[in-house]
Image (cartoon, rainbow, N blue to C red):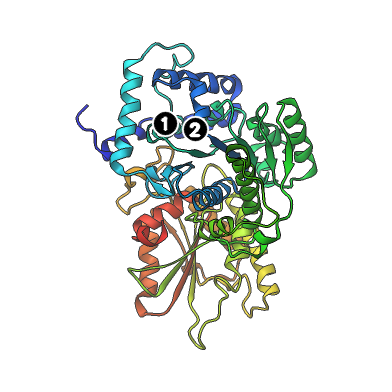
Amino acid sequence: MSGRSYKDAIDLLNTLQSNAATLEAMKASGGGKANGLVLLEMIEYLERIGYKQEDLNSLNVLHVTGTKGKGSTCAFVDSILRHTKPEWKIGLYTSPHLVAVRERIRINGVPISEELFAKFFFDVWDRLEENNQLHFTARQPRPMYFRYITLMAFHAFFTLEVDATVLEVGVGGTYDCTNAVPRPIVTGISSLGIDHVGVLGKSLGEIAWQKGGIFKEGVPAITVNQPREGMDVLRQRSTDLKASEFIVVPPIPEVSETQLGVAGTHQITNAGLAVTLSQKFLELKESILPPTSLPDTFIEGLKAARWPGRCQTVSDPNCPPIVWFLDGAHTTESLECCIEWFASPVAALRTVSAGDYPTRILIFNCTHGRSGPSFLEAMLTKMAAQLQIHGSSVTSQTFFDKVIFCTNVTYADGQFKGDLTAVSVDKGDLKTQQGLADAWASLVPTFPKEHVHVLPSIEHAVSVTREEASNGRPVEVLVTGSLHLVGGLIEVAGLSDVAL
C-alpha cells in the first residue's frame, strides 16, 4: 500500500461502492434472503476488527430511524446532550455526508479530522486483512461502503471513549447494519413518510415493520405521531420485541415557542422527538427525571442545533449578490416542506427594498430513478398555495426567472471531488436532466425556453448563476432535489466555511 493519507483512505473507500447495475439488482430483488445475513455479517466484521457485539452496548447508544427527519432529530439530540452535559464526549454518526466523508463521524459536533479519519480507516483495513477467517462474509472479505464507515464509526467511538452515541440508521431498521447494537439506551422513530410507500413499493405497514426492528427488549421505544396503519404496526412491534415502554411524543409547548437552529416548521416534530429521547436517555443513564418545564440547557441545545443542507440560507462570501437556499429534499413530502419554507417571509418572500427585487433561480436534480416530473409538479402546486397564503403578487409560473437541471458531477471536467465520488452515476448521461427540462416545459408552458438550462456538472450551474449576478443585482437560488447536489454545490461554490 503506497500511502496512508486521507486521500488514500478516500480512494480505497470509493472502491467499496456499489455500481449502478448492482444497486438496480438489489432494488429489483428487494434484498431477498441477503437481508437476513446483514447483521450476521456485521457481527463477524466487528469480531474481525477486535470487538464483540456486546461491546457496542458500552457506547450508550440512542438509535434513531424513520423515513423523514431522522438526521435532523439526531442533530437536535446531539446538541441537547452537549448543552446539558458539557463534560461529556458525544459521538454522532449520520449519513450521507455533504462535502467530506468525515462529516459522518463527529465528536462533540465536530467532524473528526482528516488525520483521525485516515487512522481509523487503516486500522479497520489492516485488522480485516490480518483476521481473514470468513464465515458469513465469505463473498465479501471487506464490507461495502456504508457498512465499512459504520465499522469505522464504532471503532472511533470506542477508541475516543465517548460517553454517549447518537446513531442514525442508514436504511430501514431491522436489517440495517447499525442494528447490530444489542441493547441501546433508547430507540426513536421519526415520521414515516407516506410518499415513501410509492417509492419503495411497500405498504406503510411494511415500512413501519422495518423501522420498528430497532426496538429492543427492555429498551424504551419512542415515536412521533404516525398515520394509523404505521402506528398500529409500531405498537405491535414494540410488544413483540419486548420494549420496556412505548411512548408517543406528546406536544411540547416550549419546542413550538423556540426558534430552532434548523429552519422549517416541520422541524418542530423532529425537535419534540429529540427532547423526549434526550429526557429518557438522561433519566436512564443519570437518574435525571424530566422536569415540569423544559430546562434552559434543552432550549439552548435546540437553538444551537445545526444540520447543514436542510432549509439553510447561505450568503455567498465569494459573490455577495448571491444568496443560496439549500435543501436536500428528495421526496414529494420533503420537497413540499422545502417550498413551504422557501416561499415564505423568512426566506424568498422576506422584505426587499423598493425596486431591488432579486433574480430567482432554481437548481434541481433527482437521483436513483425517482420521479422527477411528479416532484416538479408537487413543488409548483405547493408554491402556488404558499404564494396565495402570503398574498404575493407573483405566481408559481413566474416565481423563478431561470431553471437549471444539472447532474451531481462535481466539476466541469467531468470529475468528482474524491469524497463525492459516485460510481453509480453515468457522467456522460443527461437523460434525467433533459427529462426534467421537458417536464418543466409541460408544467410551465409559458416559461421562456432560453431560461431553462440542462448542464453536465454542478460547476457549470454555479458558473451560470454567478454570470447572472455579474451585474450586481441580487440573485436568490434554491438548490434542492438531492443532498448530493447540495453537497457538491457547497464544495464548488466555496461555501464550506459558512455552510458546514
Which image quadrant for residue 14? top left
Q: Residue at x 33, y 47 (%)?
A: 417
User: In the displayed structure, would residue 16 be above or below residue 463?
Assistant: above
Q: Residue at x 57, y 25 (%)?
A: 182
Which image quadrant for residue 123? top left
- Give left or right: position of 95 versus 332: left
Q: CA distance from mark 2 to mark 1?
A: 7 Å
Who is closer to the viewer here, 484 or 268?
Answer: 268
Q: Position of residue 99 (x, y in %)?
A: 39, 50
Residue 59 - label? 2
Verify CB contact (< 8 Å) between mark 2 and mark 1. Answer: yes
Farthest front residue? 287
Q: Amino acid at mark 1?
A: Phe
User: In the displayed structure, would residue 483 be above or below residue 494?
Assistant: above
Residue tagged 1: 158
| SS of the residue under disc 1 | helix
Which image quadrant for residue 157? top left
Q: Is residue 114 visible?
A: yes
